[in-house]
Image (cartoon, rainbow, N blue to C red):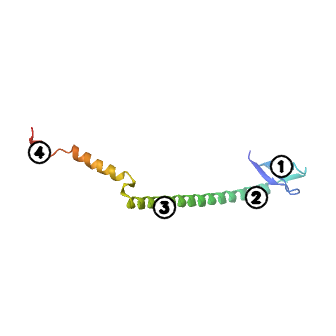
């Protein structure tokens, strides 16, 4: 059974009650609170819209988070590109490209090797 947290109409203290029609006693002021089916429907109606509201807030926060991370990534890549333009030896990328070219040339048989049998 689901529990609800409501405010006592007399003392405004919090009460934890079951989600069923019954009479409940407030733990703070000992006042008897009658939880009717109309009040139950009202709490379900309010709970439905609270759920929609929290979903919208979560979607908004998710979009904001993704935008910030994309913006930060863009700034990082821009800075990295600028550093590579200013100093080509900043990264080992060019050295690795030169080594790959050398390896391709070394493994490629020359034209005259075909005739050296």
Secondary element at image label 4 = helix
Q: Secondary structure at mark 2?
A: helix
Other residues around mark 3 within 10 Å, as few (<14) / some (14–19) / many (≥20): few
Q: Residue 38 occupies which quadrant of the picture?
A: bottom right
Q: Which residue is mark 1?
A: 22
Left or right of 62, for residue 27:
right
Q: Which residue is mark 2?
A: 42
The answer to which of 114 and 105 lies nearer the viewer is 105
Q: Against 80, is 30 above or below? A: above
Please report contact status of discs 3 and 4: CB closer than 8 Å, yes or no.
Answer: no
The C terminus - image quarter: top left
Q: Earlier in the sequence, mark 1 or mark 4?
A: 1
Classed neighbour count for the residue bearing mark 2: other residues with Cα under 10 Å, few (<14), some (14–19), many (≥20): few
Q: Nearer the viewer, residue 48 or 67?
A: 67
Marks 2 and 1: CB-CB under 8 Å? no
Disc marking residue 112: 4
For the residues labelled 1 and 3, the Cα–Cα distance comes to 60 Å
Mark nearer the viewer, 2 or 4: 4
Image depth: mark 1 or mark 4 in front? 4
* Disc on the earlier residue, 1 or 3: 1
Question: For mark 3, what is the residue?
Answer: 75
């Amino acid at each position: 059974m689901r529990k609800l947290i409501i405010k006592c109409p007399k003392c405004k203290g919090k009460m934890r009650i079951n989600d069923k029609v019954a009479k409940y006693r407030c733990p703070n002021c000992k006042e008897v609170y009658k939880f009717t089916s109309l009040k139950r429907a009202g709490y379900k109606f309010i709970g439905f819209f609270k759920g929609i509201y929290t979903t919208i807030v979560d979607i908004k926060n998710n979009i904001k988070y993704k935008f910030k991370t994309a913006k930060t990534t863009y700034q990082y890549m821009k800075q990295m590109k600028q550093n590579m333009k200013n100093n080509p030896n900043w990264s080992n990328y060019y050295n690795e490209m030169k080594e790959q070219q050398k390896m391709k040339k070394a493994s490629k048989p020359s034209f005259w090797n075909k005739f050296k049998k």
